[in-house]
Amino acid sequence: MRSMYTYIEQAPAIARDIIARRETLVGPLVEQFCGMAPKRLLIVASGSSYDIAMSMKPFMQQTLGIEVSVEWPMSYILYNYAQNDETFVLCISQSGRSTNTIEAVRRAQACGHHVAVLTCTPDAPMREYCEHVYAYGSGTEDYYVAKGFPTSCIYLALFAIEAARALDVRGADDCAALLSDVSAVVEDMDEAYRAARTFAEQHLDAFVDARRIMCVGIGAGYGVALEGALKLNEMIGVAANAYEMEEFVHGPTYEIRRGHVVVLVDLGGPGHERMMQLYRALHVLTDEVYVIDAVGEGPAQSDERTFGLKPLTGCELDAPRAVIPFQVLAESICSKLDLLSYNLSNLEFEKQIKNKAN
């Protein structure tokens, strides 16, 4: 099995290729989407695919000018499938084998909705159930989703930009500026990775010794917090959870003890001031308060526990960079503790629960 580092290192080049080939990779989905000019986009996904969707929801909603919702497949199947005719259903499955997502595709089609599937696996079993299956060019991975997260985010950003252009929601100059923002994020991913390796070395012991890790974000940062907690769950089996910023202060803070680690994902935007207020208050409860910061200003700047990203335009596009410290920390802990990053006992569990198609 390859190290996650290998996939993280591959991601920037793949993202550049997706941008260069966006007409071929994104164009067919844009054409299908714009053919119905929907008033609502519903994304159905689970695991890292759900986190990707949550990370890109704010940008997509702002860019497309329509409601964008994200739902788990089983919730969609059992409780939320009766959408109106103006809803476009986009199902995302990295492997293309998620049984719940396959069932969600079948349910959406049975209801007469326009459906498309995104996957990183061109020959995925999903093709047996849906006519419109698009591979976004990242290639497959072993178990964990490392390169798939940032590259999928880039694909969804490009889709939103090109669809907004085609529907005349955004002008050519506006779309060109957004595309430039996407490229700037991709060009900084290599530097973010190098900085994350150094940051992980400096703070690894605190995360290795942590009895509890709580990841907090808002907007795109909440999607990053979800993925960060998931990577820590999957790879090292630590008790890690993600919280939306304001929900975090409505109960979860009562369980914080000394030795618990809190990671705040601050990508700027309207939630920045409140996030810094939370940052200051948390030191009453624990010394282990870390910040993934893309703002470049505020009280956390002088803190050695702050991982600073180069401030760029467009905070809702920062997920591809902001997830890198979580990925590097998870892999670094695995290496230090000599852990097998995929718990083999889960093979039997997954066999019984049947969450993946053959």
Image (cartoon, rainbow, N blue to C red):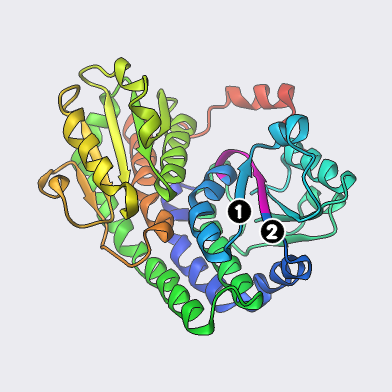
In the image, residue 38 above or below residue 253: below
Residue shown at 57% from the left, 26% from the top? 344
Local packing at callout 2 (Cα closer than 10 Å; few below 14, some 14-19, many 20+) is some
Rendered location of residue 282, percent (x, y): 21, 29
Q: Quadrant of the C terminus?
A: top right
Q: Is residue 254 magenta?
A: no
The answer to whether residue 224 is left or right of residue 329 is right
Residue 139 lies in quadrant: bottom right
Decide whether the magenta segment is chiefly helix, strand or loop. Answer: strand
Residue beneath disc 1:
67
Residue shown at 60% from the left, 25% from the top? 346
The answer to whether residue 8 is left or right of residue 117 is left
Q: Earlier in the sequence, mark 2 or mark 1?
A: 2
Farthest left residue? 302
Amino acid type assigned to the residue bearing label 1 in the image: Glu
Q: Please report contact status of discs 2 and 1: CB closer than 8 Å, yes or no.
A: yes
In the image, residue 1 above or below residue 254: below
Residue 214 lies in quadrant: top left
Amino acid type assigned to the residue bearing label 2 in the image: Lys
Label annotation for residue 39: 2
From the viewer's side, name the closer residue of 201 and 251: 251
Q: Secondary structure at mark 2?
A: loop
In the image, residue 198 above or below residue 38: above
In this view of the protein, can residue 200 be seen by the observer?
no
In the image, residue 122 above or below residue 94: below
* Magenta-tinted stretch: 41-48
